[in-house]
Structures are given as C-alpha cells and as structure tokens.
Image (spheres, grey):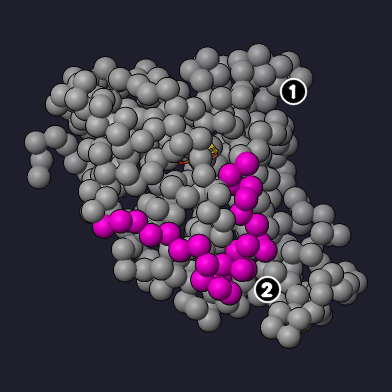
Amino acid sequence: MNVVNTAPVTAERDLRFTSEVERDTAHLYAKVSKVIPEVEWPVFAPLIHRINQLKAEKNAVILGHNYMTPEIFHCVADITGDSLALARHAADTDADVIVMAGVHFMAETAKLLNPGKKVLIPDMGAGCTLAESITGEDVRKLKAQYPGVPVVTYVNTSADVKAESDICCTSGNAVEIVEGLGTPRVIMLPDEYLALNTAKLVTPEVITWAGRCVVHEMFTPEDIRGMRADNPGVVVLAHPECSPEVIAEADYAGSTAGMAGYVAKHKPAKVVLVTECSMSDNVAAEYPEIDFVRPCNLCPFMKKIELSNILATLETGQHEVLIDESIAARARVSVERMLTGWAPGAA
Ligand code: 13P
Ligand code: SF4
C-alpha cells in the first residue's frame, strides 16, 4: 500500500497515514479487508491509531454495538455485542472512562451501572425512535390503568421510563424475563412488535405500547418473500423489532447477538440479516465464505457515531452522560433486576 497524506497536520494532531500508522494498523486492516476497500484505509487508519493510543493513555474502554460501522466495530471497540452484552460488560469494566459507540439509551444504561465513572457519547443526537415513543408520565398512567401488573421495559428507553418500571429486558432475554415473572399479565414497553413477538412465546397475557423502531418497521413480509425468490436457499434471520408478519416469514428470530451466533453455528451458504445494515458488514468481515444478501435499512441515530467524533470525545471529554440521582436510583433497580434476576414478591 502506498503512503498517502489524507488530513491536515496541526500542532496537536498528526493524522497522516505514515508508514508507522500503516504498520501499527496492518493487523486491524486484515480484519476488515473484506468489507473496507483498500483505498479507504488511509482515511480511517490514522484516526484508529490515535483513538487506540488515547484509550490506553486515559484508561478508557469503547463499547461498540453490533450496528457500528466495521472500522469502529472491528478496529477501536474493546467490547462489542448486543444491548445485553454491552450492559453486562459495562457492569464489569475497570476502565475510568466508558465511551459508548452506540446510542444514548445504551450510554445511560452504562452510567446507571457505573455511577462513579465518566460515561461519554460521541454525539448527543444518537437517539432512538423507541426511546422517544414513551415518557415516565406515560408509564405512570399505564400503571394506574393496570394496577399490580408488572412493567417490563425494553432497555431502548430513557432512564426516566426505566425508573417507573419493575424490570428491564432486551431482545436477547425478553422471553426469559417475561416468563420468569410468573404473573398472569405483564405490561411490556415500548416496542409493540417486540411485545407481540414475545407474547407468542410466553404464558402471560402481554399488554403493549405503540412504539416502533424506524429501522425494523420498514421491512415487510413481501420484502422477505422477494428475497427468497431472488436468492433460492437463502436463510432469513430477523430481529424481533420487526413485525410479527415479518417474523413469521423468517427462519430464525433473535437479537443482534442471536443472529451473529446463528451464523457462527450454522454457517449457512447464503444468509440475510433482516436488521440494520452495518450488522451484515460486521459479520461478513468474519465469514468471507458466506454470501450475505444485504437489504439496507440504516439507523440514522447509530450512524451519528463516527471515528472522528469518537476521537474528539476522547480528546476533550465532551458529551458526558449524566442522570439525576433521584431518577437514576430507581432506574438502576430495573436494570440490575434484569442482570441478576427478579420476580414480583421477591426483595
Ligand atoms: P440488540 O442489539 O439488543 O438486539 O438491539 C437492537 C437494537 O435495535 C439496538 O438499538
Ligand atoms: Fe432505536 Fe431502531 Fe436505531 Fe436501534 S435500530 S437505535 S431500536 S431506532
């Protein structure tokens, strides 16, 4: 590869693609060479190099969700996974600083589990349509409407909503959490499709809320049938934030980690991941022998996170996520119950 100068040099920041940068990042390029063209590497490599230096200097850890682009997911994130894995790792880390390469509710969850640590997000605009669909006041009204019915809240919510809930769940443990409550009814918020898909697999009656994920609600059963017609033999894996009609057309439904695990275990010759675009790139980077069909629905919020703002966050400490302790104390209980187990009537 030729050495190319791609960025202006300032006194503080030298982001040239030098031979040292090329050498130090060669092992990282090997991980993503199937999904990042060689011509783009000189732009990414200096940022990656500097981010990894700063992480060590500041004892920072980067948590990267499965929807991050491959240069973030494979080259700067220390921990990667679905929302559940990121929450579990956030609870365990020894780092002084946690940078969330994901969306705001994930950073809030990390902060709830690490009240004494600095939690940063590279862009405060990295929201979520599910988190936007409901407020703490909405939950209070629902509880008044259904007294005594436990509230299971998807982690894709604000701390304010979690504070009004009994227990959190993710798409990776929703069935287990709802079934584990042992009650005849549960309120499950705010993703209507996740709740309906969960309701098909559990004993309790599930009361839903009309929240939707902007990425997954776009997929239709006709899309899936079209993919099968165009790609004979394709294995269809779908996220449970898709509608029940879409899930009915799929071969498997599971969280982003569940889908990645399915590919690792079954190694289908041809597969489609019915979810956010970058997920396929990240899994495809590890399985060059598998043919990935790529319908592309981007999450505009996840895509706000880039190498450049991760670097700026580490350099400046900007965009710290803070939660009022009167809310945090109650929201933390809901998240901790999800991680350690809980049923109504238990302490
Ligand atoms: P999981 O990674 O937990 O499956 O969640 C998907 C998602 O939409 C996160 O925003
Ligand atoms: Fe929210 Fe959907 Fe984006 Fe996930 S993919 S952050 S659920 S809008």
Question: Which quadrant does the N terminus fall into?
Answer: bottom right
Q: SS at mark 2?
A: helix
Q: Position of residue 100 (x, y in %)?
A: 50, 58
Q: Position of residue 169 (x, y in %)?
A: 34, 38
Q: SS at mark 1?
A: loop
In magenta segment, residue 345:
no
User: Who is closer to the viewer here, 55 or 28?
Assistant: 55
To which residue does mark 1 refer? 231
In magenta segment, residue 304:
yes
Q: Earlier in the sequence, mark 1 or mark 2?
A: 2
Q: Is residue 261 above or below residue 106?
A: above
Residue at 52 percent across and 44 percent down: it is 127
Check disc 2 and give the amino acid type: His
Residue at 82 percent across and 59 percent down: it is 40
Q: Position of residue 141 (x, y in %)?
A: 25, 27
Q: Quadrant of residue 223?
A: top right
Residue 337 marker: none
* Figure disc tally: 2
User: Who is closer to the viewer here, 185 or 330?
Assistant: 330
87 relative position to 343: left or right? right
To which residue does mark 2 refer? 49
| Viewer can see residue 12 | yes
Residue at 48 percent across and 67 percent down: it is 61
Crowding at label 2, few (<14), some or many (≥20) Cα neighbours within 10 Å?
many
The boundaries of the magenta stretch are 300-325
Residue lying furthest right in this view?
2
324 relative position to 95: left or right? left
Q: Quadrant of residue 53?
A: bottom right
Question: Which quadrant does the C terminus fall into?
Answer: top left
Residue lying furthest front in this view?
137
